[in-house]
Amino acid sequence: MKKFLSVFLLLTFTLLFSQEKKPMFWQDIQNFKKLNQENTPPKDAILLVGSSSFTKWTDVSDYFPNKTIINRGFGGSRLTDLNYFSEELLNPYQPKQIIIYCGENDFADNPKLKPKEVVNRYKVFYKKIREKFPNIQVDYISMKYSPSRENLWSQMRNANKKIKAFMDKEPNAEFIDITKAMEDTNGNVRKDLFLEDMLHITPEGYQVWTKIMEPYIK
């Protein structure tokens, strides 16, 4: 009877464990692992980490010829997700530079979020990077002002300003501001650089990013 009960409990535990809800973006991380198994990540590459602005930049290598780029952006991700999956996002690689685009979704996920909280989330991720890669170049691309999220622009500006101040004090670190380049001569955000959803950017938008990013690319 005891043996039967033990087997029953074991099966019950296994069933419950198998049905446990996977964390958000778990599948994206598994896809990255599969890519790494199929092709060993090259050393001394430029590692892109962040949200959908990187995910949708599927042809990023075409914009930076002669550069080795590993794109590990996953759409919808927040800085909290980068922190949660930091080991999976950093450990498999030996990059010479990491470029981050993330933070916009943190505000979209919680419009009441204070800029300081997003900045602190970024600092946590930055610290995780430095624990593994103390001397490589680390760059942060400013949060763009997506027309569909105009209600969040003020918070994003504040967070961008604080992250820039932080990065300016760090060695081998740069804040890459793409916001001005995405404005017209009157200082308005160029909607023509965005897709119909007014959130993600067009190939021309990526060309604008490329011109700003080029001086920072190792």
Image (cartoon, rainbow, N blue to C red):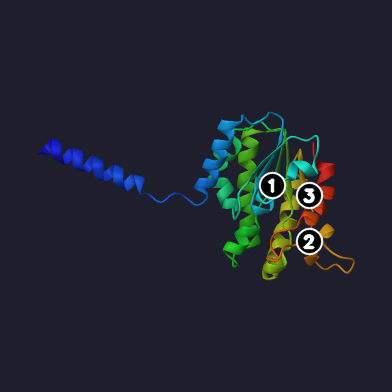
Measured Cα–Cα span from mark 2 to mark 3: 18 Å
Pointer 1 local density, CA inside 10 Å: few below 14, some 14–19, many at least 20:
few
Type of residue at label 2?
Leu
The quarter of the picture where the C terminus appears is top right
Secondary structure of the residue carrying tag 3 is strand
- Relative to the observer, which residue lies in front, 187 or 128? 187
For badge 3, the amino acid type reads Ile
Q: Quadrant of residue 92?
A: top right
Residue 13, picture quadrant: top left
Residue at mark 3: 176
Give the answer, above or below, for where 200 lies relative to 175. below
Q: Position of residue 144 (x, y in %)?
A: 73, 59
Q: Earlier in the sequence, mark 2 or mark 1?
A: 1
Q: Which residue is mark 2?
A: 193
Q: Which residue is mark 1?
A: 58
* Left or right of 203, for residue 54: left
Mark 1: amino acid: Thr
For disc 3, the neighbor class at 10 Å (few under 14, some 14 to 19, many from 20) is: many
Mark 1 or mark 3: name the one nearer the start of the chain: 1
Residue 197 falls left or right of residue 180: left
Of 158 and 105, which appears nearest the observer? 105
Residue 47 percent location from the top left of the image: 69, 39
Mark 1: secondary structure? loop
Foreground: disc 1 or disc 3: 1
Percent position (x, y) of residue 154?
A: 71, 67
Q: Residues within 10 Å of mark 2 (few under 14, many from 20)?
A: many
Q: Is residue 154 visible?
A: no
| Quarter residue 67 falls in | top right
Residue at image location 78% in from the left, 52% down from the top = 206
